[in-house]
Amino acid sequence: MSSAKKYSCCSPPKLVAVSGVIFYLSSISFLLYNQLNSPTPNFLSPLLLNFPCPETSKNSENSPTEIHHLMFGLVGSAEAWKHRKSYIESWWRPNVTRGYLYLDTTPSPELFPWSSSSPPLRISEDISKLLNETKHVAPVMARMVHAILEIFRQERDGVRWFVMGDDDSIFFVDNWVNALGKYDHTKYFYIGGQSEAILSNVMYSFEQGFGGAGFALSYPLAQALANNLEDCLRRYPNLTSADLITMTCIADLGVSLTAEKGIHQVDLRTDISGFLSSHPQVPLMSLHHFDVVNPIFPLKNRSQSAIHLMKVANFDQSRIMQQTICYNKKISWSVSISWGYSAHIYEEIIPRSILKRPLKTFTPWARNSTGPHYMFKTRESKDPCEAPTIFYLDNVEQISPNSEIITSYVRAAIAPPGLSSCSSGENSSKHIIKIHVFSPATKRIETGRSECCNIDKQVGRDIVKVKIRSCAEDEIIR
Ligand SMILES: *[C@@H]1O[C@H](CO)[C@@H](O)[C@H](O)[C@H]1NC(C)=O
Ligand SMILES: *[C@@H]1O[C@H](CO)[C@@H](O)[C@H](O)[C@H]1NC(C)=O
Ligand SMILES: *[C@@H]1O[C@H](CO)[C@@H](O)[C@H](O)[C@H]1NC(C)=O
Ligand SMILES: *[C@@H]1O[C@H](CO)[C@@H](O)[C@H](O)[C@H]1NC(C)=O
Ligand SMILES: *[C@@H]1O[C@H](CO)[C@@H](O)[C@H](O)[C@H]1NC(C)=O
Ligand SMILES: *[C@@H]1O[C@H](CO)[C@@H](O)[C@H](O)[C@H]1NC(C)=O
């Protein structure tokens, strides 16, 4: 018998009275079953467990999902927090984002008083008794999974989704709110992302939400998981990955992964700019392994890169890193914008189907595997006309709340190796030092289609203007 406390909803006597009859009829067999099987029959707890959780705060069940409905559970180590703090603080909104940071031990004194820009600190519970009992092969992993139970116990009033993640990940909170808002939080949902590395999915599971990048549990699923978590840790003492244990426990509850493409585990190494410059056409939700990959902006370190990216993300998360491609046939240019991150100029007309593929600037996660490595096709640019002239985000501005947002991109100081100019005539991109991208003040609405853009290049000028707009109904982008 589990020692774990069973979690039920707050205090539903009123609800019981109102819908008691219907509920009684529909759940009579469930109650009987429970009484027969439970060593300590308890009429109330199955009743409560079977009940959708009432939200006691401002909103009713049907209201749109908002930021306060999300509870973040971030799991990290005291040792790494010193330098990872800046990644989390780049996106954490004090007193707006709800959640807690769980560290393995109390961090060193110089981190106190605890920064109000960081998530509130909790120290992971001591589960050594449980570990002794189960002989768990990976105590650290068991601790990470246990954090789900701990955060559920900590705070659940008015929560619709529990979002678990690592301390070396950057979250785009508005996009999580929108993405989770598509699902019914009163049902059982396990939402996460697969790895970009084929081998990671093979070794762990294609059915697993890779936890570093974050996964979300709807309230009823988090509740069911919390109620069974310690028993589940007892069932699987030999699993060596926290994400795999979590998936296995969730699978035992009959729930499967719903994959979201904007959640990025980033099982890639070195320079991921090629990957980020062809982000799939969905809102970006998270970037994990920020500590492993090179700083994403060439002249900045990792913390500066996180702050730089979040600065522009705060103007418009709906477009951040979304790829928009456009052409100027007269000068024979293709331009690919990864909004808020990079801009690429090609002195050739290259179809979207090709430009959508990430440029292989990165290396595989598994250093010595033979491949195939990635869950997507990549491309290389051997011919200088297939290689872009690369620009990275410099600045973002918006003159007034309703005016267009102008992001500017400057030429990368570090040119990719082997790049020589494609053409040298009047239409060469050699002289271009900056690109200004104008995008609408209104958020991008997902239509199943990318946006379109126009390229304005004046002879003799060293700045190119690109205007992002909606595509016309039958517009062919090429
Ligand atoms: C958050 O709220 C607390 C308590 O209401 C307040 O003391 C603190 O200054 C607030 N922090 C920020 C960054 O607004
Ligand atoms: C765990 O087991 C070890 C030896 O088997 C023992 O020394 C230790 O006190 C136990 N810890 C707990 C918390 O039970
Ligand atoms: C875990 O592995 C050990 C050693 O191989 C084995 O004895 C034990 O039965 C395994 N436990 C489970 C639950 O599979
Ligand atoms: C990153 O750069 C900033 C500004 O120069 C500096 O304060 C910070 O210490 C650097 N961080 C690391 C980890 O080097
Ligand atoms: C350069 O672009 C102009 C249009 O702006 C075009 O008339 C001209 O033919 C192009 N030159 C070359 C070498 O492609
Ligand atoms: C790959 O790496 C593993 C572990 O690091 C090592 O045992 C193995 O020999 C390596 N294989 C090759 C082909 O280098």
Image (tube, grey):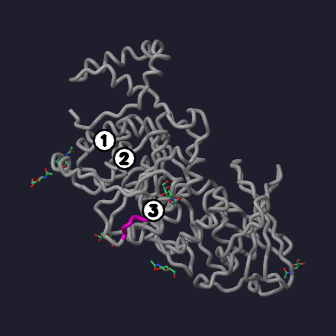
Locate residue 105, reporting x and y percent. 28, 61
Residues 189 and 6: in front is: 6
Locate residue 240, reporting x and y percent. 28, 54
Residue at screen point 55% across, 44% down: 180
Query: Could you say whether the residue bearing mark 2 is in a helix, strand or loop?
Result: helix
Cα distance in 3D space between marks 3 and 1:
28 Å
Relative placement, left or right, of 92 versus 3 is right
Locate residue 138, reporting x and y percent. 25, 56
Cα distance in 3D space between marks 2 and 1:
8 Å
Per the rendering, the mark at residue 148 is 2
What is the total number of numbered labels drawn onto the structure image? Answer: 3
Query: Amino acid type of disc 1?
Result: Leu
Quadrant into which the C terminus falls: bottom right
Per the rendering, the mark at residue 118 is 3
Q: Is residue 247 above or below residue 397?
A: above
Query: Could you say whether the residue bearing mark 1 is in a helix, strand or loop?
Result: helix
| Pointer 3 local density, CA inside 10 Å: few below 14, some 14–19, many at least 20 | some
Query: Could you say whether the residue bearing mark 3 is in a helix, strand or loop?
Result: loop
Q: Look at the image and give the residue range highlighted in magenta.
A: 111-118
Please check the rendered image and state whether residue 321 is part of the magenta-colored stretch, yes or no. no
Locate residue 293, reporting x and y percent. 47, 71
Residue at screen point 42% across, 68% down: 84
Q: Earlier in the sequence, mark 3 or mark 1?
A: 3
Cα distance in 3D space between marks 3 and 2:
20 Å
Residue at screen point 32% across, 36% down: 227
Residue at screen point 55% across, 36% down: 184
In which quarter of the view is residue 426 placed? bottom right
Task: Say which residue label 1 marks.
Answer: 229
Residue 372 is at least partly visible in this image: no
